[in-house]
Image (cartoon, rainbow, N blue to C red):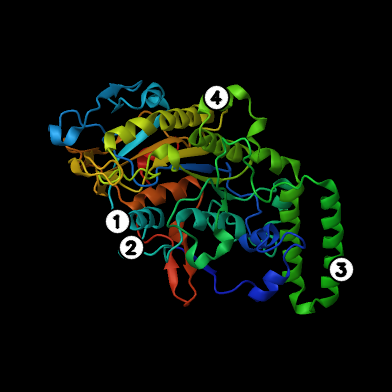
Amino acid sequence: MSEKTHLSLSGTSGVSRREWLRLGMVGLGGLSLGNLLRLRSTAAVPSHDQNTALIIVFLHGGASHLETYDPKPHAPSEYRGPFQPVHTTVPGMHLCELLPNHARIANKFSLLRSMVHTGFCHGIGQQQMFTGHDIREFKPKSDHPEFMAITNHVRYRHGLSPRNNQIDSSDRQFPFRKSITASSLPGYVGIPPIPYLGSAYLGPAAEPFKIFGDPNAPNFKIPDTRIADQEKVHRLNRQRTLRNRLDRMQRDLDLHKNMQAMDWFEQSAWNMLTDPNAQRAFDLSQEDVRTRDRYGRTRWGQQCLLARRLVEHGVDLVTTTLAGPEAGPVQNWDDHAVNHHVFDAMKRRAANFDQAVAALIEDIYDRGLDKRVMVLVTGEFGRTPKISYATGSISKVRQPGRDHWPRATSMLFAGGGITPGQVIGATDIRGEDVVARRIGPVDFLATMYRHLGVDPSRIEFTDFSGRPIPVLNAGSPIPELLPV
């Protein structure tokens, strides 16, 4: 095997934290966008040949595979639930009747029904799936970075070539320079980010630009992407120019290149604040009203539309977490009987979910983005096939539920140049266990890295203790999910 690329994360070019914070943009307060982008180092245009992108639609809490992508009509009554399977545009592929729009466009996506891991709680399940490490102890944030943060760090900070994942020696000190003029947008956005994950030892440089709130609300705004008061723009620009002059007088010759790099990051932050293209990317009012209606005038519908807008404008990693009031009383997909009546909850949330996801997939194809952009729909695990019963904490009546089930998880893949209309893997008649094509997190992640142009077998990081950490210890891309 050829020599791996080692990326040390124990420091940032010898510049102290105090120095980083001192150099924040004047007038923006706190950890400003200037500091954030300066830390993030994500201003570069990726060198991948096709500039591939990924949208993850995340069903926080764990959606039932039986009521979505893997119905079990022949299971005993204590398993199957009240909903029937429906035919789709793909012969032999059946979905739950709650997803008629999915069924109509089934020839545009493929299903994986055989994801398995061992994380029985939400945090561990998410951390195993998105880091590839066999995490057994829950922590609010994983000790290992999620694959989106790793990709963000590798593709943007270090400018790795998609062919050999070696650090590009040309313009090594400033691999981000080309992108400053090409894009003012971050490389990774969470609308909002997936819970329990993080960049771990990669630091805040690899974190997503976080968007909270309801994009369907009339007063929805993205923080730090617009300065409406032009006089304030001119005033901040004057302050910034004066501060730059004063800083240059204090610079030590040994720090010259580091300070020059910070200037570039500050310029990128300033571009994001004032660049009309960056503002337009986040502005859903730029969309035709028929397109907005197509996604659904709901929080989830407009989150998915915003995700599509961002990848179309050049953002390469977008996660959109479908949670909040549209998910039901507990505001997620965690359908324990104590939380709510599982089948009532699924029926209530299904229409918005079905409309938003189907519109996103169709839109990716209609706009010719299906080769470059992959859409992934998943939760952290499935739900127990055998229905449980408990007294609801809100309803105060005995009601059905489904609990956590990492032994069988269904995932949807669309775009990315893959062959649509496939069903990969299978579970038994009750939906309890995988009986064909068992897939673990490392194979799933190897597939995602392949799409994003990162070869994990040739990269390892050094954590704060000096220990080398491989990106993945094992795993191979899933052949059916590779571009054709």
How far apart are labels 4 and 3 at the CA level? 50 Å
Please, is residue 457 above or below residue 314 in the view? below
The residue tagged 4 is 293
The amino acid on which the numbered mark 3 sits, given as a three-letter code, is Arg
Viewer-closest of 94 and 467: 94
Mark toward the start of the polypeptide (3 vs 1): 1
Q: Is residue 4 visible?
A: no
CB under 8 Å between discs 4 and 1: no
For mark 2, give the secondary structure: loop
Viewer-closest of 466 and 295: 295
For mark 1, give the secondary structure: loop
Q: In screen coordinates, is 90 left or right of 368?
A: left
Q: Position of residue 337 (x, y in %)?
A: 25, 43
Q: Position of residue 211 (x, y in %)?
A: 57, 48
The amino acid on which the numbered mark 4 sits, given as a three-letter code, is Asp
Mark toward the start of the polypeptide (4 vs 3): 3
Q: In screen coordinates, is 268 left or right of 408?
A: right
How far apart are labels 4 and 1 at the CA level? 38 Å
Dot 3 crowding, Cα within 10 Å, few <14, some 14–19, many 20+: few
Q: Position of residue 91 (x, y in %)?
A: 30, 21
The amino acid on which the numbered mark 2 sits, given as a three-letter code, is Ile
Viewer-closest of 295 and 4: 295
The residue tagged 3 is 245
Q: Is residue 186 visible?
A: yes
CB under 8 Å between discs 1 and 2: yes
How far apart are labels 2 and 4 at the CA level? 41 Å
Dot 1 crowding, Cα within 10 Å, few <14, some 14–19, many 20+: many
Identify the residue at horizontal 37%, vertical 48% (top origin). 444
The residue tagged 2 is 135
